[in-house]
Image (cartoon, grey):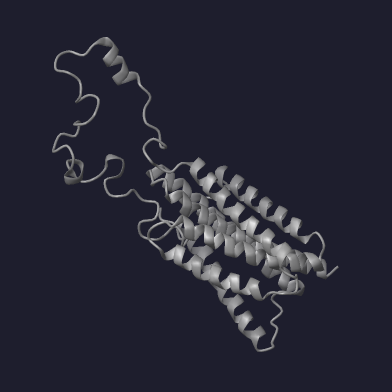
Amino acid sequence: MRSSNPVFSREGSFTREPGYAGFGTTAQAGGQYGNNPYAGTPCAQQPQGPLTDEQLYEMYNGPSAGPAATGRMTLDDVVARTAMTLLTLVAAGAVAWFALPFENFGFAIGASLVAMVVGLVVSFKRSVSPPLILLYAALEGFALGAVTHAFNTLFEGIAIQAVLGTAAVFAAMLFAYKSGRIRVTARYQRIGIAIAMGFVLLMVVNMIAMAFGADLGLRSGPLGIVVGLIGIGLGAFFLSLDFAAIEEAIAQGAPQKEAWRAAFGLTLSLVWIYVEMLRLIAILRGDD
């Protein structure tokens, strides 16, 4: 089943490369050794005549090649790349936290806009680019670090609360997905994407209204709390799409480099949840 996540739905995403893992065309398979599929293997290199018992044992009892040996993506690959991406994000956020005055959002806004452009390039780029993914993480982390510093100055301790809240949502969604309580079906995806599109459109309208001095009240008061909860719920929905896409990619034997695409998708979802969590906690604490 193809994911509706724009990061994972690009043509060529999480698929075998031509001729990958022995499933290429006949012409590709015979490129180096003619039409003999066994040429170049230990079997073809054996001398003529019957094989010895030791040779037979090595042929039939040796360890089979695993995903790592064949260049396929594994869950460990996804975890490692995601850790690298998130560490880059956190490190850049720490730089912004300590280097920028909390009331100066100029650099943060600039970094956020550039991060958005880089993120779009990564999302719609057919081939995976680890440097671009890490660049996105650094820019997004820089912007989030400055914003978080400002929020934490107004509401002491809100940063750690938002981090713990984001981690709790991730853990809950992972448990719900692995236990089968959430199934990523086609209907589930259609409903979730429709709600997400409506939410984004509403936020764009709210931003335009605020630019002209109007306030729709979507980020304050009881309505702001409801909007914040919906935003976090959508972030959790995106995580479920990520989990399903990663699981399917591993099952299909996607190339190892696709682990970077998975890491990028998970980072996008976690950033979404963190931002919405930060806003929601600020509204709740502001109303105290």
| Quarter that holds the C terminus | bottom right
Q: Is residue 161 left or right of residue 62?
A: right
Q: Is residue 5 left or right of residue 230?
A: left
Where residue 89 appears, as percent x and y from the top left, is 61, 57
Q: Is residue 165 left or right of residue 57?
A: right
Residue that protrudes farthest toward the right in the picture? 288
Tell me if residue 185 can be seen: no
Where residue 4 appears, as percent x and y from the top left, is 45, 60
Residue at position x 56%, y 55% in the image? 239
Q: In this view, does 104 lie to the left or right of 207?
A: right
Where residue 203 appears, as percent x and y from the top left, is 61, 76
Residue that protrudes farthest toward the top in the picture? 53
In terms of image quadrants, where is residue 212? Answer: bottom right
Residue at position x 27%, y 40% in the image? 22
Residue at position x 61%, y 45% in the image? 175
Residue at position x 43%, y 50% in the image? 258
Where residue 61 appears, as percent x and y from the top left, is 34, 19
Marker count (numbered)? 0
Query: Front-most of 113 and 7?
Result: 113
User: In the figure, 236 relative to 254: above or below?
Assistant: below
Query: Front-most of 55 and 15?
Result: 55
Residue that protrudes farthest toward the front in the picture? 99
Query: Front-most of 237 and 79?
Result: 79
In terms of image quadrants, where is residue 284? Answer: bottom right
Tell me if residue 124 can be seen: yes
User: In the figure, 108 relative to 164: above or below?
Assistant: below
